[in-house]
Image (tube, grey):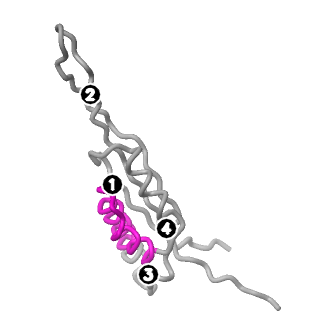
Amino acid sequence: MDTVALEARAVQRHLRKAPRKVRLVADAVRGAQVDKALKRLEFTKKGTAADVAKVIKSATANLRDKFQEERFNDEDLYVKTIYVDEGVTLKRIQPAPQGRAHRINKRSCHITVIVAKREEEIVNN
């Protein structure tokens, strides 16, 4: 039998934040329930927390649109996978003394979130 995995994904591309900073926030919510992850991000003092929360909400909405016949509570859903890839780097120069130039890298990243429904564990006594 082929069972359909109840999961959906959302991707935020070309976010103008350094991937190193976004990964700190993404690591905090990996594997958490969606409602708890959003609550944790609400009180996180990082600038990227709002961006990560937006992608998690989008993945949750994608799951509800994909499986309209199912009923989902936020307690049943969890962040199955979240990762941050490096995007395009804009290379700029900063004039320096004596005719030199220092390079400034303006980094961007891609956030990918997969949200799934937690399977009920069957316990046999």
Q: Is residue 71 above or below residue 111?
A: below
Q: What element carries label 4?
A: strand
Q: Name the residue under label 3.
A: 74
Q: Mark 4 points at which residue?
A: 79
- Which SS does the magenta portion mostly show? helix
Q: Residue furthest front?
A: 97
Q: Is mark 2 on a helix, strand or loop?
A: strand
Q: In this view, does 65 lie above or below 51?
A: below
Q: Mark 1 points at which residue?
A: 12
Q: Which mark is residue 21?
A: none
Q: Is residue 111 magenta?
A: no
In percent of width and height, residue 63 lies at 42, 73
User: For the residues marked 4 and 1, what is the alpha-carbon distance in whole angstroms?
Assistant: 15 Å
Q: Which residue is drawn at 29% across and 30% down?
A: 105
User: For the residues marked 4 and 3, what is the alpha-carbon distance in whole angstroms?
Assistant: 11 Å
Q: Return the disc, 4 or 1, that comes first in the chain's sequence.
A: 1
Discs 2/1, front: 2
Amino acid type, callout 2:
Ile
In percent of width and height, residue 74 lies at 44, 81
Q: Residue furthest bottom?
A: 125
